[in-house]
Each structure stands twice: as structure tokens, then as C-alpha cells.
Image (cartoon, rainbow, N blue to C red):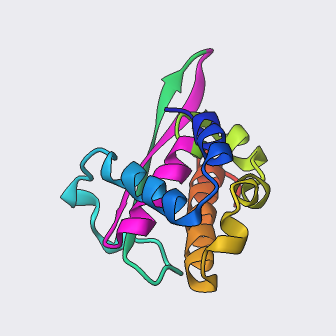
Amino acid sequence: MSFQKIIDDFSVIDDWEERYRYIIELGRRMPEFSSKYRTDEFKVRGCASQVWLFSHSEQSGKNADALFFSGDSDAIIVRGLIALLLLLYSGKTAHDILAIDARHVLGGLGLDTHLSQQRSNGLFAMVERIQADARRALKID
């Protein structure tokens, strides 16, 4: 599934209860997250729920290092939000990740106005963690 599919699906789902169910289902479909990454090292700070994100790089395409992410949360809606972020970022180069305007992209889905302030803060804490991993891959402080 691609992030464009999410955009397309959201364009035909008007009801926010349905959109929340869709996001939750995305989270349910995520692969199992390894328990070895459920440590403080991979925990995302700034989230009300417990959230863990793990990144690693692989060669992809024209010898550019692509970053791949996996994650999990103890909250079902947050797990779905992680799934959205993985679709948006995973498999892209560090440069591409840093070029994505997450507030604009996620705002285009309406998340900026339909998530609680606490949930929105947590979402952007996850975005910041992904971007920090990209900066670290580029050796940018």
C-alpha cells in the first residue's frame, strides 16, 4: 500500500468515525514488532502512549541508502498513526525524508483538525524522531 492510496481513500471517506476505523485497521495490519526493540533506546519521547520506532538503512535503487522504519504502540489509534508514518517515510532516502513537509501532508488528511492536541503532539514527536534518524544517517546534527 502507498501513501497515495491513503490520500485517495480519505478523499472518499467523509465520516471521521470511519476514518478512525480505517486508521486503526492500518495499525492492525502492521507486521509484528520485535520485542527486542521495546526498550528505552527506541521509545519516542513526547507521546502520551508508549511508542517505539526502529530504523535501519538498506541499499535501494541507485546505490542510495534508503531508511526503513518499524514501530508499535500500546494504543490502537496511535498504532494506526504509526502505520501512516511508515507509509509516508519508510523506504525513502534520508534526503527525501527531510524534504517531506509532514504538517502539510498530514494536514491534507485532516489530521491537524481531528486529532486531540495531545495526540497531535505525539504524532509530531514521532515525525521528529524519524527526521532525527534521517539527520543521523546523513551525519547532520
Q: Position of residue 14 (x, y in %)?
A: 64, 55
Total numbered labels placed on residues in the image: 0
Give the residues in magenta: 62-87
Can residue 52 be seen by looking at this rendering?
no
Q: In front: 141, or 112? A: 112
Residue located 53% across and 34% down the image: 91
Position of the C terminus by quadrant: bottom right
User: With respect to residue 44, does 13 lie above or below?
Assistant: above
The answer to whether residue 66 is left or right of residue 30 is right
Q: In front: 39, or 84? A: 84
Residue located 46% across and 51% down the image: 83
User: With respect to residue 131, does 57 lie above or below?
Assistant: above
Q: In front: 32, or 141? A: 32
User: With respect to residue 123, does 18 lie above or below?
Assistant: above
The answer to whether residue 32 is left or right of residue 52 is left
Q: Position of residue 39 (x, y in %)?
A: 29, 70
Q: Position of residue 6 (x, y in %)?
A: 58, 42
Can residue 92 be seen by looking at this rendering?
yes
Q: In front: 88, or 99? A: 88
Q: Is residue 27 magenta?
A: no
The image quadrant that residue 131 belongs to is bottom right
Q: Position of residue 75 (x, y in %)?
A: 35, 72
Residue located 57% across and 84% down the image: 118
